[in-house]
Amino acid sequence: VHDEWFSNEEGVRAAVGLLPGDVMADASESEHAVTCGVCFDDFSASGTNHVGCHHSFCGDCWKGYLENAVSEGPSVLHLRCPADKCSARVTDALARRFMSPEAAEKLSMFQRRSWVDDNPAVKWCTGVGCENGVLCERAGEGAVDVHC
């Protein structure tokens, strides 16, 4: 992935739905009226956000969409633009801009769990009630009993 990213960043971004980044309207757009794609209210362009795909949504609709996604579980880690059939990923920065502190903490928990689960060199501590990941320097050499 590392080599592919640096040799073809645009191709990798397109393949995984990462556009150049979430966007708030620039000053030249800020006076144009934009209709939110969820509630259909009109806002100045500066009152809406998108993830680089130009499907604009107001802050209240982003908040509702993101907080609902967090409440549904770890699938929030693969969240896409709410526009029908849009594959643009919602960036972490945009998500945290609209989430409550509690929802942002839950998102962080899902991210930590995903990182440990997806990393073969990190295992969960088996201590009762412990939620720490432990780096296993001998990962892949057979069973390892981990405790932090």
Image (cartoon, rainbow, N blue to C red):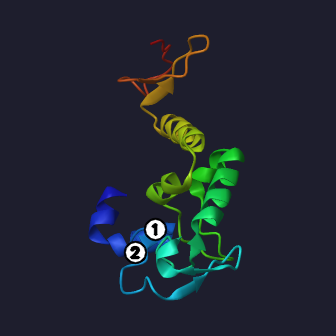
Amino acid at the residue labelled 1: Leu
Q: In this rendering, would 55 be left or right of 19?
A: right
Quarter of the image where the C terminus is located:
top left
Depth check, front residue: 14 or 3: 14
> 39 or 129: nearer the eye?
39
Task: Check disc 1 and report its element: helix, strand or loop.
Answer: loop
Q: Quadrant of the N terminus?
A: bottom left
Q: Residue at x 46, y 74 (%)?
A: 14
**Vertically, is 62 above or below 123?**
below
Mark 2: secondary structure:
helix
Residue at x 65%, y 69% (from the top left corner): 82
Q: Residue 140, percent across and down?
A: 44, 29
Horizontal side, residue 24 vs residue 33: left or right: left
Q: Which residue is mark 2?
A: 11
Image vertical order of residue 60 relative to residue 103, above or below? below
Tell me whether the residue at label 2 lies in contact with that at label 1, contact meaning CB atoms closer than 8 angstroms.
no
Q: Which labelled disc corresponds to residue 141?
A: none
User: Which dot marks residue 18?
Assistant: 1
Q: Position of residue 81 (x, y in %)?
A: 59, 69
Observer-side mark, 2 or 1, equals 1
Mark 2 and mark 1: span between their CA atoms? 10 Å
User: Number of marks in the image?
Assistant: 2
The residue type indicated by label 2 comes to Gly
Residue 74 vertical position relative to residue 122 in the rendered view, above or below: below
Q: Identify the residue shown where x is 36% and y is 87%.
A: 28
Q: Earlier in the sequence, mark 2 or mark 1?
A: 2
